[in-house]
Image (cartoon, helix red, strand yellow):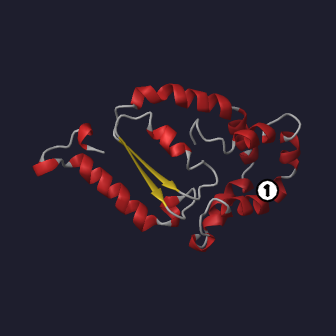
Amino acid sequence: MNPWSAHGKFLARILSSPAISPLLLHATPLMKVTHSQLLRRLYGDTSRIRPGTLEGYSAPFDKPGALQHGLGILRTWKRDLADLESMLPNIAKIPTLLVWGSRDAAVDPASASLLSAGFENCRTVMLEGVGHLPYEEVPEEFNTIVSKFLEHLAVGPKGTTASSEALV
């Protein structure tokens, strides 16, 4: 999530509205089926969904109060995004890696460049054909990218400790 992605803003406002949220609370039994379908949209390639994954993500709907908790998150979505945006200058100097899927249906891939502009030293990797969960969809590639980023941070040229300026 980031303040520059329009994905989800409208839906969060509608689902948390006083007219709609009570209806959702009465539809809890149907939410597991709907939730599974929504989760599938988060993958760039649904054949990469590992067995048990969708069931694991849907399991919280069996717990009392889970849907109310989710609706509470949606009610503060706009304020939370504003808070996030206002805090970005406080972390702008931290070397940052953004790993994004080009087929992310939850957070607009186009917003990656706007988010990265808020950092002095940011590397963005766009994974072609991958959705919102690159660490699940292509875990080996994701881990390689993160490992190389961390190695570059830990060891600079000729074995010296890397500075944030060395990352590009």
Closest to the observer, 66 or 89: 89
Q: Is residue 122 left or right of residue 72?
A: left
Number of numbered tags placed on the structure image = 1
The quarter of the rendered structure image containing the C terminus is top left
Q: Is residue 51 left or right of residue 164?
A: right
The answer to which image quadrant residue 35 occupies is bottom right
Q: Is residue 121 left or right of residue 118?
A: left
Percent of width and height locating residue 73: 68, 38
The answer to which image quadrant residue 22 occupies is top right
Residue at 63% from the left image edge and 59% from the top image edge? 42
The answer to which image quadrant residue 62 occupies is bottom right
Q: Is residue 31 left or right of residue 124?
A: right
The amino acid pointed to by label 1 is Met
Q: Secondary structure at mark 1?
A: helix
Q: Around disc 1, counting alpha carbons within 10 Å, would you say few (fewer than 14), some (14 to 19), or many (20 or more)?
A: some
Percent of width and height locating residue 52: 61, 70
Percent of width and height locating residue 43: 61, 63
Q: Residue furthest left?
A: 158
The image shows residue 88, relative to residue 112, as above or below, that is above
Residue at 62% from the left image edge and 70% from the top image edge? 46
Residue at 49% from the left image edge and 38% from the top image edge? 115
The image shows residue 135, relative to residue 91, as above or below, that is below
Residue at 52% from the left image edge and 65% from the top image edge? 137
Q: Which residue is mark 1?
A: 31
Percent of width and height locating residue 163: 22, 39
The quarter of the rendered structure image containing the N terminus is top right
